[in-house]
Image: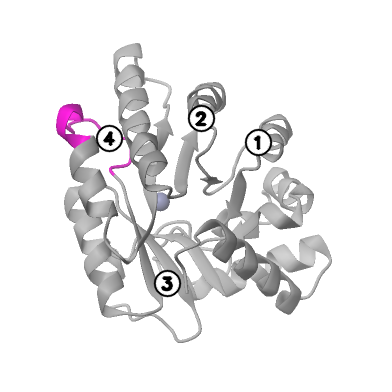
Amino acid sequence: MTDVHCHLDNQLLGNYTPESGLVSITNGTGWKSSEKAIELASKDSSVWACVGLAYEKGFKLSEAEKRLENLAKNDKVVGIGECGLNYRQDTDDETKIYQHKLFRAHLAVAQRLGLPVEVHNRNADEDILKILDEFRDVKILMHCFTRGREFMNKCVENGFYMSFGGLVTYANNSRMKTMVKEVPSHLLLLETDSPYSVPAGIKEPHNTPTNVKIVAEVVAELRGCSVAELEATTDANARQLFFKLK
Ligand SMILES: [Zn+2]
């Protein structure tokens, strides 16, 4: 099984050691975190890295692209991420414009190196689609899909992959449950977003990639297929998108 989005460099995961048979793609959220992602991936054959700066303020846009490109050339880097747009209620226009530039820098690197991109989207459907339209040849994963049907239809139209995580396991999350039933099989992926997004029923305060199995059980039940079938489909999709995975 493949956890396409987690943060193994996060201190909350402590001494977590990846379970055998489980492939995980750890995403960077800054320079240190991206370097650490590569380091963790180099130590373990089942761990792969994406490098990215996420969306927080403070990165020098002038150096971001070049430096990111250098990191992304590493053999264990299978994609660019985390990156994207994060609109809170108080996000002002200046911040949005900065986020757009940082997001474009990630996409430009992905385009040059032919790598896929893991995209974070918080309340930014329209701007995400507008920016991605400038990079049509870049393969996209909408990570932790939480949006509605209209956005999903656009993703399907554009051939974007969508991954679902712990949030879909909660009984009251009927919108996500509906969405996960509707994703076309060839675009569906699983993730944990560890150490965040702990699935329902888990007592530990932090999530680990092992829990991707719990997500898989819930998703399989919702889609009316076996866990084995879902695993085969989503693993094949992961290898299709992250072509460097072995
Ligand atoms: Zn994340």
Instruction: Report which residue position mark 4 lands on.
Output: 56
The numbered disc on residue 132 is 2
Marked residue nearer the N-terminal end (1 or 4)? 4
Q: Which residues are magenta?
A: 53-64
Going by the numbered disc 2, the residue's amino acid type is Leu
Q: Residue 168: horizontal and vertical position, in percent?
A: 63, 55
**Front position among marks 2 and 3:** 2
Marked residue nearer the N-terminal end (1 or 3)? 1
Instruction: Report which residue position mark 1 lands on.
Output: 158
**Going by the image, does 76 lie left or right of 229?**
left
Q: Badge 4 local density, few (<14 within 10 Å), some, or many (20+)?
A: some
Q: CA distance from mark 2 to mark 4?
A: 19 Å
Instruction: Report which residue position mark 3 lands on.
Output: 204
Residue nearest the viewer, comparing 185 with 90: 185
| Furthest residue in direction right, as rendered | 224
Q: CA distance from mark 1 to mark 4?
A: 27 Å
Marked residue nearer the N-terminal end (3 or 4)? 4
**Going by the image, does 130 lie left or right of 223?**
left
Going by the numbered disc 4, the residue's amino acid type is Glu
Label 1–label 3 contact, CB within 8 A:
no
Q: Badge 2 local density, few (<14 within 10 Å), some, or many (20+)?
A: some
Q: Is ligand 1 less than 8 Å from the beta carbon at label 4?
A: no
